[in-house]
Image (cartoon, coloured by chain):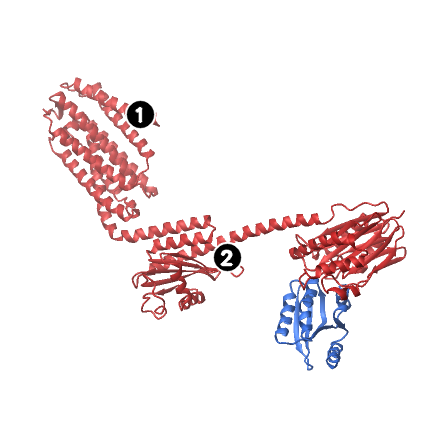
Chain colours: A red, B blue
């Protein structure tokens, strides 16, 4: 781009110098119809085409405001006029005219002619270029077309001037082309859409610059029109097409800026209202952006109050965000602008609540035109600078989630417009608040989800990772919580060389609460089982430990058995838990020694009720411990899995390994419930006595 | 499916009956808790829980009785249960509730027990 710019500029300068040399060399020669004459004209046209290209590139690099464009056009007009004045002081000999042709009397005149021509040409090009930006602002389909027709007709008109002698411009064709150009100039001069969008301040500048530009162009037109004036002759001598082009550009400038001036003048009275609308739109736009970026309620509220202050020029604004019932945020959040929180609280806590409750009830905008006189507000503590008050509810799903208050110093300060704007604003803020709340909620939910996953991991580790292996005893267990974490528990502990203790339990309730108690039971089991003389003794000790720490509506059911791995003797005690299923030969029964759930009753009553049962296992005997998740699983019709089905399943698979039996139970429960009705923690522990 | 209702009925012998109907689990326990709470706040401590139409009770449901029994007994009152279906009784029985509460066949039988106690 830089090189192209440089080449265009150098080319234009080089060609101008060439034209100057030709002019100087052929000072007194009539060049009519000669080759050199065409070359000279071509050089001029090409050099200014290059200037056009140069300006085009420069313009594209810098986007400029409309007002700056006008100012610069006015500056160029001024430059032209200054050059004109400067040259006026030079002692020029001027031109001789013969047969409508011009002959310079001295070299200085040739130099002056070149200079003023260059300035005029650049001026003309800059003018149409800058006006182009203005015309094509807010373009429609026809806008660009009209502009290009204008430019085309200007160029054609200008070039047609080359067909005749410089001082004989009275051709019919030229006249028609001229008229067409003027017509297009007028047509294009109605393209003044940019004025409406200027802020008020810029409109005033635009008015000033347009006027300056208008007079500048007018002055140039007058100078160009002075018959036998040396400027006219100088440019005509240099190139007749250039003269026409400059004149048309000046007409364009004068007409356009004349129109711009008067149009701006007419726009001035509405400028303030327009500015206001503009700032409303941009505030709403900013608010929209805010919605997508700010998820902190406080920050959101602060920004919103500040924006409201700007939009309606309120003296004080405050925003109350009403907490949601299940909310993330508990206290009402108040963001105040230009008024202290104390003053706001005084308003809200005093009788001022009546306004607040009215708005909450009606969900409609409330306007107090005169705070001092109005019955609804006259009792309010005098808020500073409050003449009128506007109260707007923020609605979301037909609930008032917040209230926006705005005051103005004077009474009757709010207009119909303000209500509309602030209502629209309030809707946006409501969306933003809702958005922020949802985001917070989902972040919180995600965090809880992560915590739960962690808890699940932890809980899995509380269960034995691997059951101990014995030659005489085949054991398998599985536990699956209904939620992320559960209250089921099983464990195995090697009490001594011969004895192994097996426990399975169920904490009342589900979820995290149950999981905590389950962890406690694990601790109790690990510490007490080894120092207990029997299952009954263990349950009594465990109850003592639990009864003091457990919530009175919670309890833990447990079944604990101790198996002698050498003899196959089994001692079992139960504390409110599902009975043990025992299958041995033709004997198939649920063994259910008496025993209260842990944590229900302290001390003596518990001790008196808990029983112990002894069994001597034979090879092939199966014991199944389980939680009520197995027996209480429901089919889709609501029927429970029950004890009979459990017994049948185990009986049918009693020849298999402990693993086979466990799998059979789980598969049967799953298929029974369709996985849908299934809704409790479920644990199964299978023991098969292989014997010696 | 978790449909649960409590009907409070005042008997002529200064005993209040709670008739439970439906499925008592963690979701529906608040209904029963509220009913107990209301009776206690009115200083009615002689309570019979009629379980005729109770189709299921979960461990959370059992917890409700545990929550109130101490307060009621401290006021010389009691919570007695009657008319349980075998299935529901089995749940109470597993946990050893019969050792802690009077669980009887009929409501009248429960009322009689209240009467006996006050005579004593």
The chain under label 1 reads A
The chain under label 2 reads A
In the rendered image, residue A622, in percent from the top left (x then y), is placed at: 85, 53
Q: Residue at x 50, y 57 (%)?
A: A329
Residues flagged by tags 2 and 1 on a common chain: yes
The local crowd at label 2, few if under 14, some if 14 to 19, many if 20 or more residues have their Cα within 10 Å, is some
- Numbered label tally: 2
In the rendered image, residue B50, in percent from the top left (x then y), is placed at: 71, 73
Q: Are marks 2 and 1 in contact (CB under 8 Å)?
A: no
Nearest-to-viewer mark from 2 and 1: 2
**Element assignment for label 2:** loop
Residue B80 vs residue A28: left or right?
right
In the rendered image, residue A38, in percent from the top left (x then y), is placed at: 22, 22
* Quadrant (top left, top right, bottom left, bottom right) of the N terminus of chain A: top left
Quick check: can you spot residue A672? no
Please say if A22 is above or below A318. above
Q: How much space separates mark 2 and mark 1, taking CA atoms? A: 65 Å
Mark on residue A595?
none
Residue A72 vs residue A455: left or right?
left
The local crowd at label 1, few if under 14, some if 14 to 19, many if 20 or more residues have their Cα within 10 Å, is few
Task: Out of A214 and A347, give the one closest to the viewer.
Answer: A347
* Sooner in the amino-acid sequence: mark 2 or mark 1: 1
Please say if A139 is above or below A633. above
Please say if A40 is above or below A196. above
**Element assignment for label 1:** helix
**Residue A70 placement: quadrant:** top left
Task: Out of A413 and A340, give the one closest to the viewer.
Answer: A340
In the rendered image, residue A636, in percent from the top left (x then y), is placed at: 71, 59
The residue to which callout 2 is attached is A329
Mark on residue A6?
1
């Amino acid at each position: 781009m830089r090189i192209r710019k440089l080449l265009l500029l150098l080319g234009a300068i080089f060609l101008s110098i060439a034209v100057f040399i030709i002019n100087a060399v052929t000072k007194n020669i009539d060049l009519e119809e000669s080759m050199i004459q065409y070359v000279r004209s071509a050089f001029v046209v090409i050099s200014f085409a290059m200037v056009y290209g140069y300006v085009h590139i420069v313009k594209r690099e810098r986007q400029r405001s409309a007002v700056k464009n006008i100012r610069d056009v006015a500056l160029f007009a001024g430059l032209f006029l200054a050059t004109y004045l400067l040259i006026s002081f030079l002692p020029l000999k001027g031109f001789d005219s013969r047969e409508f042709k011009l002959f310079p009397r001295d070299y200085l005149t040739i130099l002056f002619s070149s200079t003023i021509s260059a300035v005029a040409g650049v001026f003309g090009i800059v003018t149409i270029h800058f006006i182009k930006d203005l015309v094509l602002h807010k373009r429609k389909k026809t806008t660009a077309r009209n502009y290009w027709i204008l430019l085309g007709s200007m160029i054609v008109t200008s070039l047609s001037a080359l067909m005749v002698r410089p001082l004989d411009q009275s051709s019919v064709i030229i006249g028609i082309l001229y008229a067409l150009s003027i017509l297009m100039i007028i047509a294009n001069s109605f393209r003044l859409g940019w004025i409406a969008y200027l802020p008020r301040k810029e409109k005033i500048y635009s008015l000033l610059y347009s006027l300056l530009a208008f007079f500048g162009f007018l002055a140039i037109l007058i100078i160009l029109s002075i018959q036998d004036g040396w400027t006219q002759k100088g440019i005509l001598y240099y190139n007749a097409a250039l003269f026409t082009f400059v004149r048309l550009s000046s007409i364009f400038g004068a007409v356009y800026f004349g129109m711009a001036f008067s149009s701006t003048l007419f726009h001035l009275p509405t400028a303030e209202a327009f500015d206001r609308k503009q700032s409303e739109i941009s505030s709403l736009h900013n608010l929209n952006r805010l919605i997508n970026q700010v998820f902190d309620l406080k920050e959101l509220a602060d920004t919103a109050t500040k924006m409201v202050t700007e939009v309606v020029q309120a003296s004080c604004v405050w925003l109350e965000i009403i907490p949601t019932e299940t909310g993330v945020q508990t206290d009402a959040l108040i963001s105040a602008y230009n008024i202290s929180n104390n003053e706001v609280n005084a308003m809200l806590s005093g009788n001022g609540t009546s306004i607040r409750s009215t708005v909450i009830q009606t969900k409609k905008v409330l306007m107090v035109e005169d705070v001092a006189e109005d019955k609804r507000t006259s009792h309010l503590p005098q808020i500073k600078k409050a003449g009128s008050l506007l109260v707007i509810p923020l609605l979301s799903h037909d609930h008032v989630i917040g209230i926006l208050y705005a005051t103005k110093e004077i009474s009757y300060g709010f207009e119909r417009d303000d209500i509309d704007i602030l209502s629209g604003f309030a809707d946006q803020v409501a969306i933003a608040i809702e958005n922020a709340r949802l985001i917070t909620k989902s972040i919180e939910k995600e965090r809880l989800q992560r915590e739960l996953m962690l808890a699940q991991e932890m809980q899995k580790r509380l269960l034995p990772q691997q059951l101990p292996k014995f030659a005489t005893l085949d054991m398998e267990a599985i536990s699956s919580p209904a939620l992320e974490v559960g209250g089921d528990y099983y464990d195995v502990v090697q009490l001594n060389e011969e004895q192994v203790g097996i426990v399975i339990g169920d904490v009342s309730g589900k979820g995290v609460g149950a999981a905590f108690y389950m962890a406690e039971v694990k601790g109790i089991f690990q510490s007490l089982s080894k120092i207990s003389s029997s299952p009954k003794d263990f349950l009594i000790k465990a109850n003592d430990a639990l009864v003091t720490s457990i919530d009175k509506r919670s309890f833990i059911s447990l079944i604990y058995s101790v198996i002698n791995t050498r003899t196959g003797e089994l001692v079992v005690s139960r504390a409110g838990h599902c009975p043990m299923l025992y299958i041995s030969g033709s004997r198939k029964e649920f063994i259910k020694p008496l025993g209260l759930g842990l944590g229900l009753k302290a001390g003596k009553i518990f001790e008196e009720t808990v029983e112990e049962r002894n069994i001597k296992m034979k090879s092939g005997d199966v014991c199944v411990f389980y939680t009520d998740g197995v027996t209480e699983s429901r089919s889709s019709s609501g029927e429970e899995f029950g004890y009979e089905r459990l017994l049948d399943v185990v009986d049918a698979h009693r020849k298999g390994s402990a693993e086979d039996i466990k799998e059979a139970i789980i598969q049967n429960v799953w298929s029974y419930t369709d996985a849908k009705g299934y809704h409790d923690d479920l644990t199964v522990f299978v023991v098969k006595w292989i014997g010696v | 499916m978790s449909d649960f209702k409590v009907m409070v009925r005042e008997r002529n012998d200064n005993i209040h009956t709670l008739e439970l109907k439906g499925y008592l689990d963690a979701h529906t326990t608040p209904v029963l808790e509220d009913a107990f709470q209301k009776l206690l706040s009115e200083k009615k401590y002689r309570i019979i829980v009629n379980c005729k139409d109770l189709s299921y009770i979960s461990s959370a449901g059992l917890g409700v009785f545990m929550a109130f029994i101490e307060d009621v007994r401290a006021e010389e009152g009691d919570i007695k249960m009657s008319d349980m279906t075998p299935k529901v009784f089995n749940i109470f029985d597993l946990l050893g509730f019969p050792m802690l509460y009077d669980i009887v066949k009929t409501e009248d039988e429960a009322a009689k027990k209240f009467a006996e106690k006050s005579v004593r």
